Image (spheres, rainbow, N blue to C red):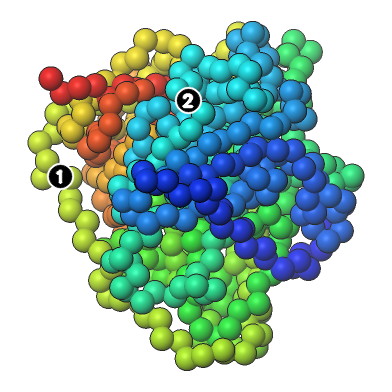
Amino acid sequence: MTRKLKKFVDSLPIPETLKTRRNTVDGNYYEVRMQEFFQKLHRDLPPTRLWGYNRQFPGPTIEVNRNESIKVKWINHLPNKHFLPVDQSILDPKLPEVRTVTHLHGGETASASDGYPEAWFTRGYEEVGPFFKGEVSEYHNQQRATMLWYHDHAMGITRLNNYAGLAGAYIIRDKHEKSLKLPSGKYELPLIIQDRSFNRDGSLSYPMQPENASNDLPNPSIVPAFTGDTILVNGKVWPYLEVEPRKYRFRILNASNTRGYRLHVDSGQPLCQIGSDGGLLERPVMMNQISMEPSERVDVIVDFSKHEGEEIILKNDLGANASPDDETNEVIKFNVTKTLSAQDKSIIPKRLSTIPSLRQNRISTIRNLTLEGSSDKYGRPLLLLNSKKWNDPITENPKVGTTEIWSFINTTGFTHPMHIHLIQFQVLSRQAFDLERYNQDETIIFTGPPKPPEPNERGWKDTIAAPSGQITRVIGKYGPYTGHYVWHCHILEHEDHDMMRPFVVIDSE
């Protein structure tokens, strides 16, 4: 960023809720257009060129009830040329430059509607990928109430399409959650956190090449990671929100490409976490700080009742203040300046839900899956899963209805947020091993006992932080659908450069 932007001068926008196009006998039908447009992201920035669902950044929130089937026609109305740097060296050169496919992240979705990376399509469906199954996606929403999110998942350009703006929230509701009397209505708000960098003219800045790139690299060339110098919430740079002195429920999503966050409020009070990726926890967990890797969601209640007249900032202390000019240690400011409109009758129940443990299931397979670092033919970092690239033969074939344990063995030097499509899983443990010894001869020598998941990780998850030099074990039941899905690191720059693998759920017979 070539100039500093003043913080907390724009109010927090709330994304619109997507309106039904028409009602049908087998569920509501929606149409969502991906289009290029310009939107002001800060008072002092010129309008920024973006790509968004229904010309919105973030896209409109989709709200459904549990077991309510809907159909969505995702329509590509984007230009044929990308405005961000497309690295052709990691792609089939015959692929069209601009292509999209929308993935409902965390959704238990049939393969044809899951957003498989090779199910892409171009403007007007003129060209489609080999796994394209039709213009309309179906979501049956037969899972717990939670906040999912939808975003682009096109092969090799997911990082660019998401950075351009193709992301939005998706909320499933049910009667049980409503009965709990949690903060609701205008006191329940999504907070979609993203990082960006801007040029002086307001345009998005994204690197053409890695820092100190040699002349031998392609131009453009994919970067191994990207963190912007500016934090946005719901499409505004460092916004503020005026709140009443009462409880609020915030559905927080980390929709950044690479950046993780460690969040706390500077009032010193704990954040009351009531849910994670897959819905409500069994009990509330009081957290002094909450860590979030890309694509993780947390459901928190913040009580402003004792802070009337105060200003409270949601802070981030992960990766912030890396330099004197780094201002990413702040996210949003809450001004407790609104008059209490009515008595706060919302509550925080001592018990929120019941989560049956998958440990009781018969385990059909235990898979040891390595997260590895190497380099490509240009000498660029290349991160792989089990030493395999995307196009290598599929090696994970769980049978529908069976329960498996997947052990992510992270042999790299940093954390990877690992995401498995189709299922919500449970975290079993993390166990440290001697990484230096492993890199000598691939011998695993544990340096401590398995550690159980953190209290706020003991719900349903679809993305989990797999730290360096540790084995992170998760357990999941594969179903209810068969077909092609993917598992990958959700650092988008890693995912696009082969840290993603297909898997197939096969019939049990």
* Residue at point 78%, 38% (across, down): 205
Task: Report if residue 310 is visible in the image.
Answer: no
Q: Position of residue 88 (x, y in %)?
A: 68, 14
Q: Is residue 427 above or below residue 400?
A: below
Camera-side residue: 16 or 411?
A: 16
Name the amino acid type tagged 2: Gly
Task: Report if residue 398 is visible in the image.
Answer: yes
Q: Is residue 49 left or right of residue 472?
A: right
Specify the label residue 324 is tagged with: none
Q: Is residue 18 above or below residue 111?
A: below
Q: Residue 121 falls in which quadrant of the image? A: top right
Name the amino acid type tagged 1: Arg
Q: Is residue 369 above or below residue 252?
A: above
Q: Position of residue 276 (x, y in %)?
A: 39, 56
Q: Position of residue 469 (x, y in %)?
A: 39, 35
* Residue at point 84%, 49% (across, down): 47
Residue carrying label 1 = 359
Q: Is residue 401 left or right of residue 318?
A: left
Question: Is disc 1 placed on a helix, strand or loop?
Answer: helix
How would you rate the neighbour count of disc 1 (Cα within 10 Å): few for under 14, some for 14-19, many for 20 or more?
Answer: few
Residue carrying label 2 = 134
Q: Is residue 198 above or below residue 496?
A: below
